């Protein structure tokens, strides 16, 4: 009996959060590294469906870096990175699109729809569908100036940056109870494809649709300091310092930088959480304790 009452208490603890977030939009970046283990994939899908059924509108943006590299190698193309960005020539762009908009996107859609019931469905689209993510070639100089690192001299090819988001498309899907699952491939003026960093895509989407929360599900506990300890609340100045010192590096840089930009544009909360913990999404959203790193927009 006691355990039964305990279960009721758990639901009760969630009530204030359900009340607060009902009808709001959460953008969830599902990292390529967090989507590997089968039981974690299942718990992610169930969490997403649960969120939708309690009235929280989820928009998923996924990565797929490891999957792209594996496929490139299968085709005999050596993956190359310049300043943390994938060097994307035309051939690589084909593979990026094939893997992201094809394999990875449809796997996630199928996974969610196995648990979705009859009232909600995941729908997979890429930034080229409905000109969802309008892009231009990345301005490398500005990008690196903004993160405070020297720009690499080498050209990165079809790496893009977002200049517009088709908000109507996302909102129409949300309104009809669909869960958009978005592959971060952008579309240029002439319809050409651009490889967009998934963290930045998630954050731009959150900005444009004025999301309540942006959550990065990744393969580490959160942002760690020089001692390797988890930082539970990270401010802008601390983030800048840690990037300069090389403590925040590689895949963590676009998360932190784009998180700050999202907060500046009115996204209420940004969290970086561990996708390797089962139900980490629910723990973050429905409990007081919270997990991972919250990025805060405070000049301290
Ligand atoms: N200070 C830091 N704290 C925590 N992780 C860091 C830090 N600096 C760099 N990292 C790296 O960032 C990685 C997370 O980014 P990564 O790009 O690998 O994953 P992802 O974005 O979740 O997946 P994908 O890029 O496929 O979408 C961590 O696994 C870690 O190696
Ligand atoms: Mg990444």
Image (tube, grey):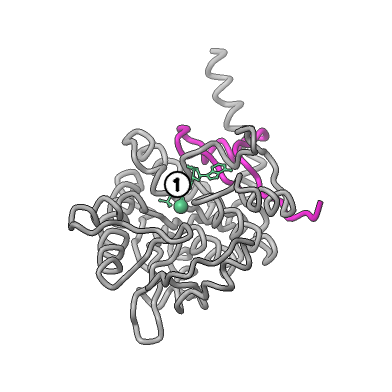
Horizontal arrangement in the rendering, residue 98 relative to residue 279 (left or right): left
Q: Please determine whether, in this image, residue 142 is positioned above or below residue 22.
A: below
Magenta includes 286? yes
Locate the N terminus and report the quarter of the image it occupies. top right
Magenta includes 39? no
Numbered-mark total? 1
Whole-percent x, y for residue 80 in the image: 35, 58
Which residue is at 52% across, 41% downward? 281
Which residue is at 31% across, 57% downward? 79
Whole-percent x, y for residue 237 in the image: 74, 53
Give residue 154's quadrant in the image: bottom left
Give residue 130's quadrant in the image: bottom left
Q: Is residue 178 visible?
A: no
Horizontal arrangement in the rendering, residue 103 relative to residue 219 (left or right): left
Q: Which residues are magenta?
A: 271-300
Whole-percent x, y for residue 168 in the image: 49, 75
Q: Which residue is mark 1?
A: 48
The residue furthest front is 153
Q: Is residue 247 visible?
A: yes
Which residue is at 46% across, 40% downward? 219
How crowded is the residue under tag 1: few (<14 C-alpha within 10 Å), some, or many (20+)?
A: many
């Amino acid at each position: 009996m006691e355990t039964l009452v305990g279960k009721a208490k758990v639901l009760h603890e969630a009530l204030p959060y359900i009340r607060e977030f009902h009808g709001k939009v959460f953008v969830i970046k599902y990292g390529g590294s967090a989507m590997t283990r089968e039981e974690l994939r299942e718990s992610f899908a169930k969490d997403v469906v649960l969120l939708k059924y309690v009235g929280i509108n989820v928009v998923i943006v996924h990565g797929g870096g490891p999957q792209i590299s594996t496929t490139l190698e299968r085709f005999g193309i050596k993956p190359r990175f310049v300043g943390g960005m994938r060097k994307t020539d035309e051939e690589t762009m084909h593979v990026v699109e094939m893997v992201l908009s094809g394999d990875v996107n449809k796997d996630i859609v199928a996974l969610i729809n196995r648990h979705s019931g009859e009232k909600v469905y995941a729908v997979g689209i890429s930034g080229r569908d409905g000109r969802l993510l309008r892009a231009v070639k990345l301005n490398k100089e500005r990008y690196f100036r903004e993160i405070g690192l020297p720009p690499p001299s080498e050209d990165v090819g079809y790496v893009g940056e977002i200049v517009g988001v088709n908000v109507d498309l996302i909102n129409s899907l949300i309104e009809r109870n669909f869960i958009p699952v978005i592959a971060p491939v952008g579309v240029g003026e002439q319809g050409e494809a651009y490889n967009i960093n998934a963290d930045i895509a998630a954050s731009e989407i959150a900005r444009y649709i004025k999301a309540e929360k942006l959550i990065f599900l990744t393969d580490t506990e959160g942002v760690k300091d020089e001692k390797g300890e988890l930082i539970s609340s990270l401010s802008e100045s601390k983030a800048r310092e840690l990037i300069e010192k090389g403590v925040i590096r590689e895949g963590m840089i676009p998360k932190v930088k784009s998180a700050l930009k999202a907060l500046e544009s009115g996204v209420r909360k940004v969290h970086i959480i561990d996708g390797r913990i089962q139900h980490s999404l629910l723990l973050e959203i429905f409990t007081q304790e919270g997990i991972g790193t919250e990025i805060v927009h405070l000049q301290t």
